[in-house]
Amino acid sequence: MEVTVHTYDFNMTKREVESYIVNNRLPGRVSEYAVMPLLWYAMFVNSVTSRFMDVARGIEAEAMKQKIIVDLCVLFRNRGVFVDLLTNKEVINLVLMQFSKEDELLYVGEERGYERGIKQGLEQGLEQGLEQGLEQGLEQGLEQGLEQGIRATVLSLHEIGVPIDVVTAQLMKRYDLTFNVAEETIKKVLSV
């Protein structure tokens, strides 16, 4: 037994869809399939999807989307596509419900995703902010405390008459400073 499988790619660009809607011109790459109902179904779905992309999301856009579907049903019917189906009000209502339901699910999913993203972003931002704030605060506090301790040591030793070279040695020993840094620090503290 031999089986032949055919696959068709009837995805359309916005330009191809608009060319069909406005000029009744099928894209050349699919025109040979014009006798296939599958092509016309794909054209209808591509047309609806393309027109929906131009409409904002949300409840207020629902009426506009329903009008798009009805207008496309009339257009396709007038062009002889799915005449039996597209003259049946029940079928049109089913099409409206299907596209509305899909759009609603997409909208609800996007809203939930957006809300979840905001929540996660806030939580992560707060957590990172607290961590960074604590780190920076601790670093700044330690730095300021060290500066104040060095300043107090220099002033105290200077006030009781300790020679500058001994103060320098004490700063190097207590605060693990190099000779040049200790000397610069003493000059800075005593010049103020």
Image: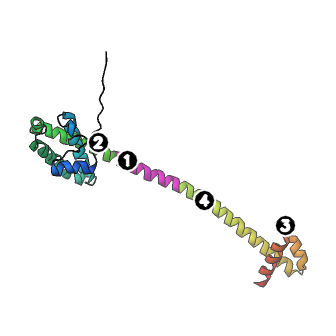
Most distant residue in the bottom direction: 191
Q: Which residues are magenta?
A: 109-125
Cα gap from disc 2 to disc 3, whole angstroms: 76 Å
Q: Mark 2 — residue? A: 11
Ranked by sequence position, the earlier of labels 2 and 4 is 2
Magenta part, dominant SS: helix
Q: Are marks 2 and 4 in contact (CB under 8 Å)?
A: no
Ranked by sequence position, the earlier of labels 1 and 2 is 2
Nearer to us of marks 2 and 3 is 2
Q: Position of residue 32 (x, y in %)?
A: 21, 37
Cα gap from disc 3 to disc 4, whole angstroms: 29 Å
Q: Mark 3 — residue? A: 174
Q: Would you place residue 50 above or below residue 132 in this image?
A: above
Point 40% across, 51% down: residue: 115
Q: Are marks 3 and 4 in contact (CB under 8 Å)?
A: no
Cα gap from disc 1 to disc 4, whole angstroms: 30 Å
Element assignment for label 3:
helix
Cα gap from disc 2 to disc 4, whole angstroms: 49 Å
Q: Would you place residue 50 above or below residue 155 in this image?
A: above
Type of amino acid at the residue the image marks with label 3: Arg
Type of amino acid at the residue the image marks with label 1: Arg
Nearer to us of marks 2 and 4 is 2
Type of amino acid at the residue the image marks with label 2: Asn
Labelled disc at residue 112: 1
Point 11% across, 43% down: residue: 79
